[in-house]
Amino acid sequence: MARMRPQVLIIGCGFGGLEAARALRTADVDITVVDKTNHHLFQPLLYQVATAGLSAPSIAAPIRHLFRRQRNVTTLLGEVVAIAPTERTVTLKDGARLHWDHLIVAAGATHSYFGRDDWAAHAPGLKTLSDAFEIRRRVLMAFEAAEREEDPVRRAALLQFVVVGGGPTGVELAGTFAEIARHTLPGEFRRIDPRQARVLLVEGSPRVLQAMPEPLSERAREQLAALGVEVRLAARVTGIDAEGLDITTATGAERLHSRCIVWAAGVAASPLGRVLADATGCTLDRAGRVVVEADLSLPGHPAIQVIGDLASAHSHAPGRPPQPVPGVSPGAKQMGRCAAANLQQRLRNQATTPFRYRDYGNLATIGRNSAVVDLDTPAGAWRFSGYPAWLFWLFAHVYFLIGFRNRFVVLIDWAWAYWTHDRHARVVAGSGLSAASPENGAQA
């Protein structure tokens, strides 16, 4: 009788899940990767799809294609809705059940509206390709509607774009919206001047890019202002509806009229965290992330590991107190490799290793020739901004893209956009600001 190899189930094929599966390519195990989409997404460049700079296939790759040469991996399209740790099974949305001996949960994160989920209909976030298609549709359709609008007040509202949240995604979106209005669209309309559009970035804290040192944060704000973005700091959003949003600042309440609002202010863990907590009794933090042990396993459930944005993990460096791991792609990748290594150590009945996060720094682009970089290297910290930082950001992102084709296509698209200011992916399905967002926008 053939020996049954250990069954490893990985839920989610983002950065963490993909890295874990790849790290087990030579292991004597059978791996099943389950994801509710058929593609791996390079999220750091998702805003480029939302702003028509890149087409969807440039930053996404079919999961089956990624594992076509890894014979110990089976890929399944499905959404996990229940986990049974005692029986060691998971249940998919269609009722199918999958058995596992070892489980790695890398289900990622979603938007958080801080208890005001009704805002989602008026201010979409950016986590998936569908989100990117919807944001792109709203931005482009706002200009189309303004071209037809006779009333100057309503036209001004259509041409006012608001991004809520001053993290990397918010800064990148706001800067690119300003570039679209000032460099891409002028000359294409007859009744409006796209350069008259206003782009506002609303941030609740005293500065943008909170994770970066204050001098770089201030430099980012200056570069945004140079692009024409109005930055509102220490501004708390109190309401969002179809006509705009309400904010509160030190000077009082203010109403911002806008038909195109994008939410980049909050992140919450995948709902699968609550499913896991109900099944295992594990603890969730305030953001819904699963609190894990030093080796990324669940307390009392060593065969279950949680990684990526779903994990509330700490870095355990020798001689230092535990430090929280930020929700960034390098952290997810490192957790994926650690989870795979610890899984193999358990198979050999060896002690597992605490997770240690290596922070290589942060970078964010603001717009054309504008970016900020904060790097930690053995030689010390490197902090710079402007054109050199923009070049560094560009080549770093091209390097980490999945596949040679994607790297080549993105380089060509960016080079063309740099010299012409053109954004070739300005194709949307449907018309009007209230039109539904079809997922077949991936063709754009």
Image (spheres, grey):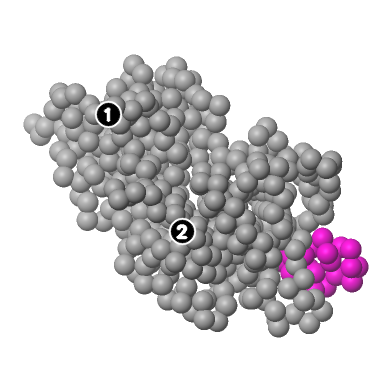
- Coordinates of residue 128 in the picture (x, y in percent): 52, 51
SS type, badge 2: strand
Residue in the image at 64% along x and 70% along y: 180
Residue of label 2? 384
Q: Earlier in the sequence, mark 1 or mark 2?
A: 1
Query: The magenta stretch spans which residues?
Result: 141-159
In the picture, the quarter occupied by the C terminus is: bottom right
Going by the image, does 127 lie left or right of 177? left
Q: Quadrant location of residue 226? A: bottom right
SS type, badge 1: loop
Q: Amino acid at mark 1?
A: Pro
Residue of label 1? 318
Say whether residue 126 is visible: no
Residue in the image at 50% along x and 40% along y: 109
Q: Nearer the viewer, residue 218 or 281?
A: 218
Q: Amino acid at mark 2?
A: Phe
Q: Quadrant location of residue 423? A: bottom right
